[in-house]
Image (spheres, grey):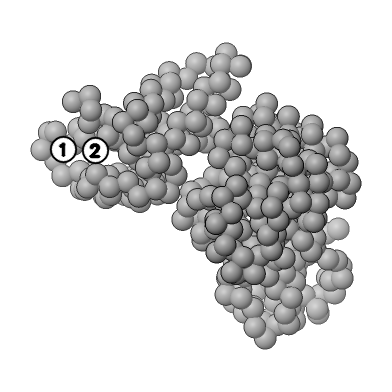
Amino acid sequence: MSSETFRARNIYRHVSLQKRLPKHFASETSFKTSSLLRQQQPMFQLQLLPHQVLNCLVRSHVECAEEELPARVGFLGLGIMGSPMAQNLIKAGCDVTVWNRTKSKCDPLISLGAKYKPSPEEVAASCDVTFAMLADPESAIDVACGKYGAASGIGPGKGYVDVSTVDGATSKLIHGHIKATGASFLEAPVSGSKKPAEDGQLIFLTAGDKPLYDEVAPFLDIMGKSRFYLGDVGNGAAMKLVVNMIMGSMMASFSEGLLLSEKVGLDPNVLVEVVSQGAISAPMYKLKGPSMTKSLYPTAFPLKHQQKDLRLALGLAESVSQSTPIAAAANELYKVAKSQGLSDQDFSAVIEALKAKQ
């Protein structure tokens, strides 16, 4: 298959998910399709409108026009990340079945058109592809491999995509249980927090069965802005832990800078602006800084999850004898913040651990 046809095929899949002809597309997918087109030069013109996409594809006789995507999508875990991810699938026209330990968290999605099953086993049994977004390794294992877990309902021809942030050993354990049923497995932890999840701007770090990756790529593109295939199971988990280790250390250092600037008589808000315009600019600083200067920490990524990821990253580093003293020091600060009752606050609340040391 030519690269041009592959690109056209990806765009067609996004359009076909709407189950509509070109006159009207849901705004989210129209935007995504337009964004895809802008990336596909020289095959398409920059200014093609969504209704022109299908006409262009028809004229081009795209090979995959008759190909169907998996009709039924399961989603397990509807927390701060899982809920908006599942909502985006529903809004894009996907047939979604949901489950969560606390049933009430399913209700908003059911009102949007999702189906509900009372166990991960039943979700996996009724769906072609099942996504799972759980809080920690223990939950991920239990939902996949425990009593009434997804592995009990899944089987040949089906796929399981774990988008939770876990360590490599956990991912490989779940992979083994899923593969033993004859199903396919993909780990796909995400980089991004609540707002990117809501906006469909996550980054997927995937590894595992390549055919399943290709099959679920359109769904990943609904929920995210980019995706990486990293090879064998464990590589996605490792990449996510490295990314979050860097992020946690950056936030700890940023917190020190805010407090130091204030101590020497500078305006920390001006520091945020200076940093945001320089070589060390990161969206995180501009997004979190103004609230941090007011001691406000609206939760986008819970502090307890950041500390968990640092702990797992340090374990990964130890397994390969890599020294990580900066991350280790940052981890201690997050532990102090947890002891102060800040576990469910945003991870930017780590600054409170430094205030306590003054």
Vertical arrangement, residue 70 with respect to residue 241, above or below: below
The C terminus, quarter of image: top left
- Compared across the picture, whether 256 is left or right of 113 comes to left
Q: Quadrant of residue 168?
A: top right
Residue 191 locus on image (x, y percent): 54, 45
Mark 2 lies on residue: 258
Residue 157 locus on image (x, y percent): 88, 50
Note whether residue 213 is visible.
no
Mark 1 lies on residue: 262
At horizontal 51% and vertical 32% (from top left) the residue drawn is: 309
Q: Residue furthest bottom?
A: 23
Q: Secondary structure at mark 2?
A: helix
Q: Residue furthest top?
A: 321
At horizontal 74% and vertical 63% (from top left) the residue drawn is: 10
The amino acid sitting under disc 1 is: Glu
Vertical arrangement, residue 276 with respect to residue 304, above or below: below
Vertical arrangement, residue 118 with respect to residue 339, above or below: below
**Label 1 close to label 2 by CB (< 8 Å):** yes
Few, some or many residues within 10 Å of mark 1 (<14, 14–19, 20+)? some
Gap between marks 1 and 2, in whole Å? 6 Å
Q: Secondary structure at mark 1?
A: helix
The amino acid sitting under disc 2 is: Leu
Note whether residue 10 is visible.
yes
Q: Quadrant of residue 117?
A: bottom right
Residue 30 locus on image (x, y percent): 61, 73
Few, some or many residues within 10 Å of mark 2 (<14, 14–19, 20+)? many
The N terminus, quarter of image: bottom right
Vertical arrangement, residue 76 with respect to residue 24, above or below: above
